[in-house]
Amino acid sequence: MKRKLIILIIVLSNLPSFSQTIADFFIMVPDSSMMNLSKEKRKQILRYSSDNLTKEDAYKDLRDSKNLYAFDIFDKKNGYLRMIGAFEGQVQMCYWNLKNGNKLIAIY
């Protein structure tokens, strides 16, 4: 009984580490898929702009942080983000959960 309890505690404590979010995928994709931004630069973008709710928030981050990129939409719950900055257009990223347990990631 004691052994089963220990195994149950270990399994339950590790469950949150298996979940993946759009932020995790933003960091994990190859640099070439994300405008050749390094993982460190993408982590920095996440740190200062993952709380943005509007385009005005993103513009404020761009001004205040002196960085060239920010999220104007970061929807962790629905797995979607949109990045704006010192480039033409925008970068959008989302993912879908497939029936076989894999994830389908799209970057536009």
Image (tube, rainbow, N blue to C red):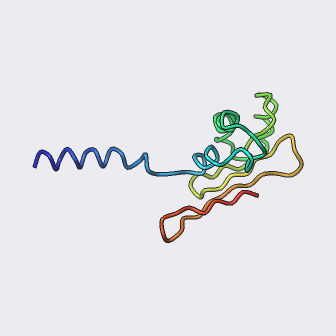
* Residue occupying the far left of the picture: 1
Q: In which quarter of the image is residue 104?
A: bottom right
Count up the numbered dots: 0
Please provide percent x and percent y for residue 8.
23, 49
| In this picture, residue 51 sits left or right of residue 84 | left
Residue for point 48% across, 69% down? 100
Q: Quadrant of residue 108?
A: bottom right
Above-or-below relation of 81 to 100:
above
Please provide percent x and percent y for residue 88.
89, 48
> Viewer-proximal residue, 15 or 54?
15
Residue for point 87% across, 44% down? 87
Residue for point 72% across, 57% down? 107
| In this picture, residue 100 sits left or right of residue 13 | right
> Viewer-proximal residue, 11 or 64?
11
Above-or-below relation of 20 to 61:
below
Please provide percent x and percent y for residue 74.
66, 49
> Viewer-proximal residue, 25 or 89?
25
Residue for point 16% across, 50% down? 4
